[in-house]
Amino acid sequence: MLKEIAITGDNLGDSRQIVLEFPTLHDALQLWKPWSDGQKRREITQLLHQALTGAGLSLELRVQGRPVARLGSGELSGAVLALLG
């Protein structure tokens, strides 16, 4: 269950960031539930990362306020990405 969505930054040079807040790690991992194969989850994650980067956006997944994954502007990082299989 998604707890909160926030968008930070502005159009005046600050990078825009989308923050998705989840109550548990299990809830955050549900984003990848439609793809049961680990390889497919990694491919989808890479495509999302490239699309966000191209749009000048970043996406941060948080569990109880702590970042667990970052996609988009910059490099892919976070503990959740290691759990994709």
Image: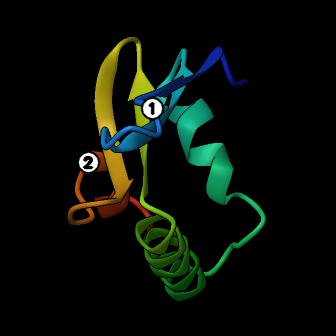
**Residue that label 2 marks:** 79
Residue 74: assigned label: none
| In this rendering, position of residue 18 left or right of residue 35 | left
- Of circles 2 and 1, which is in front? 1
From the top left corner, tell me how far across and down residue 12 is, in percent: 38, 38
**Residue that label 1 marks:** 10
Q: Secondary structure at mark 2?
A: helix
The three-letter code of the residue at mark 1 reads Asp
- Residue in view at x 40 percent, y 12 percent: 64
Tell me the quarter of the image containing the N terminus: top right
Q: Residue 68 occupies which quadrant of the picture?
A: top left
Residue in the foreground of this view, choosing between 23 and 47: 47
- Residue in view at x 69 percent, y 73 percent: 36
Q: Residue 56 occupies which quadrant of the picture?
A: bottom left
Crowding around mark 2 (Cα neighbors within 10 Å: few <14, some 14 to 19, many 20+) is few
The furthest residue to the right: 34
In this view, 81 is above or below 63 = below
User: Who comes first in sequence, dot 2 or dot 1?
Assistant: 1
In this view, 20 is above or below 50 = above
| In this rendering, position of residue 53 left or right of residue 44 | left
Q: Residue 84 occupies which quadrant of the picture?
A: bottom left
| In this rendering, position of residue 15 left or right of residue 78 | right
In this view, 7 is above or below 37 = above
Residue in the foreground of this view, choosing between 8 and 72: 8
Q: CA distance from mark 2 to mark 1?
A: 28 Å
From the top left corner, tell me how far across and down residue 25 is, in percent: 46, 31
The three-letter code of the residue at mark 2 reads Ala
In this view, 37 is above or below 30 = below
From the top left corner, tell me how far across and down residue 74 is, in percent: 22, 62
- Residue in view at x 35 percent, y 13 percent: 65
Q: Secondary structure at mark 1?
A: loop
